[in-house]
Image (tube, grey):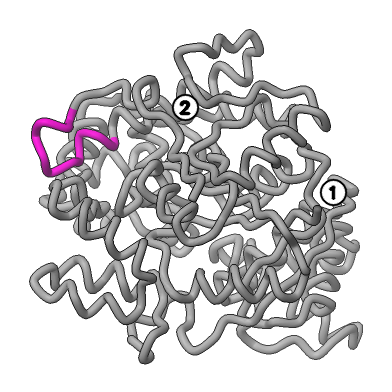
Amino acid sequence: MKILGIIAEYNPFHNGHKYHLNKSLKITGATHTIAVMSGNFLQRGEPALFDKWERAKMCIKEGLDLVIELPTIYACNSAEFFAKGSISILNFLNIVDYICFGSESGKIENLKNIADILCDEPKEYKLLLKKYLNTGITFPKARELALKEYLKQFSILNMKEDVLNSPNNILAIEYLKALKQLNSSIKPITIERIKADYNSDKFYENICSATAIRKFLLNNLDKIDTLKNVIPENSFEILIDNILKSKGPIFIHDLEQIIFYKLRTASPNDLKQIHDINEGLENRLKKACLISNSLKELIDNIKTKRYALTRIQRILINSLINITKSDIELIKKDFQPKYLRILGFSKKGTDIIKMIKKSCDIPIITNLKQYYPQDKIAKRILEIDIISSDIYSLLYKNKSMKRGSYDYIKKPYIDFK
């Protein structure tokens, strides 16, 4: 048995994901697959189009064997935190042979070289990073410029201009960093993205990005059949079923009133406790929420050179869910997963679960009613996930589905066909 690990959001599952899965299986010769998937809130600081159970169903229907939830505290965070949380789960299982991820580069050695520099942080690189940070630009941009200058100075490799400006490359490098930091034996493989870039909103015959699909769903529900060409049949049926039940699609603007309520009723000191609110940003948030009429206007009024769109969106989600600085400090002490929340599995997935039970001592949750966390970190991580689901269900268009406590009611999707 060879096991392949994949880290994803599947928002939603599309033909590009299917290509990535099939190509990964072919390259590695893996017999079983595990996906670590974000829950109801995502790395860009947005709610998922469809809830975590529906997206897990898509995964299993499309050929993945086991879907494990990436807790919200990791999923809705920086690329570094997202990657370390995900890799920590796969590594802790002690059964994963490969991890395969997409990248714009498609060259694992180049990405490894960059990851090594960012892990080791040579003195010369740190000085360059400090120089660029002092100009007031965002950390990702400062890191990109410092790395380019460092590589050029020391003639280490000829890095393409956009290597640290491409979302999948950035995540790939963070995965490699996490693997190195954990001294993991998991072998990394990367597959070059085909046709559609991450942020592209174009349709290329049967391939497009999740971004393009999300933009299409925002304004073209009356032309939904267009997506048949770019989404696998099983996933398309699940997507249609959710739309007909008025459960989705859900977008960040659906959070508008809840976010305004939270910001307008919170004190600056309350906001100051929230993760990633620094440098007096709490005062900027308070002012912006009182003069803004829409979520877009709010974000525009908060944005600075140092705080880009996705970072602001994550801060707003953190405020909503109440993810605090102390929460982050708590989990930084110990990245080791405290439990595994199973969202779905196939018949082969049961084989993996049996292996996990033998390979590591960790609670496996299929029924939350039967799980009572004793560990302080586990309790807080789970609390955040439950709050996330309770907020997310308020966004369902169907009023009869807005209740809370779905985490205690919903069971993993199981398909033994």
Q: Which residue is mark 1?
A: 181
> In the rendered image of this protein, does residue 410 appear above or below residue 232?
above
Name the residue: 28% across, 26% down. Answer: 266
List x then y, in percent, for residue 401.
Answer: 17, 32
Q: Which residue is mark 2?
A: 273
Label 1 residue SS: helix
List x then y, in percent, for residue 126.
Answer: 81, 62
Q: Earlier in the sequence, mark 2 or mark 1?
A: 1
Write down the quadrant of residue 120 in the picture.
Answer: bottom right
334 on left or right of 195: right
List x then y, in percent, for residue 112.
Answer: 83, 70
Indicate yes or no whether the magenta region holds residue 394. Answer: yes
List x then y, in percent, for residue 359.
Answer: 83, 32
Q: Nearer the viewer, mark 2 or mark 1?
A: 1
Q: Residues within 10 Å of mark 1 (few under 14, many from 20)?
A: few
> In the rendered image of this protein, does residue 179 appear above or below residue 323?
below
User: Label 2 amino acid?
Assistant: Gln
Write down the quadrant of residue 143 in the picture.
Answer: bottom right
113 on left or right of 291: right
Indicate yes or no whether the magenta region holds residue 53. Answer: no
* Any part of residue 130 in sight: no
Q: Who is closer to the viewer here, 247 or 351?
A: 351
**How many labels, in total?**
2
332 on left or right of 210: right
- Magenta residues, start to end: 392-402
Write down the quadrant of residue 219 in the picture.
Answer: bottom left
Q: Gap between marks 2 and 1, in whole Å?
A: 29 Å
User: Label 1 amino acid?
Assistant: Gln
Name the residue: 86% across, 64% down. Answer: 116
Q: Who is closer to the viewer here, 280 or 222?
A: 222
Q: Residues within 10 Å of mark 2 (few under 14, many from 20)?
A: some
Name the residue: 56% across, 55% down. Answer: 64
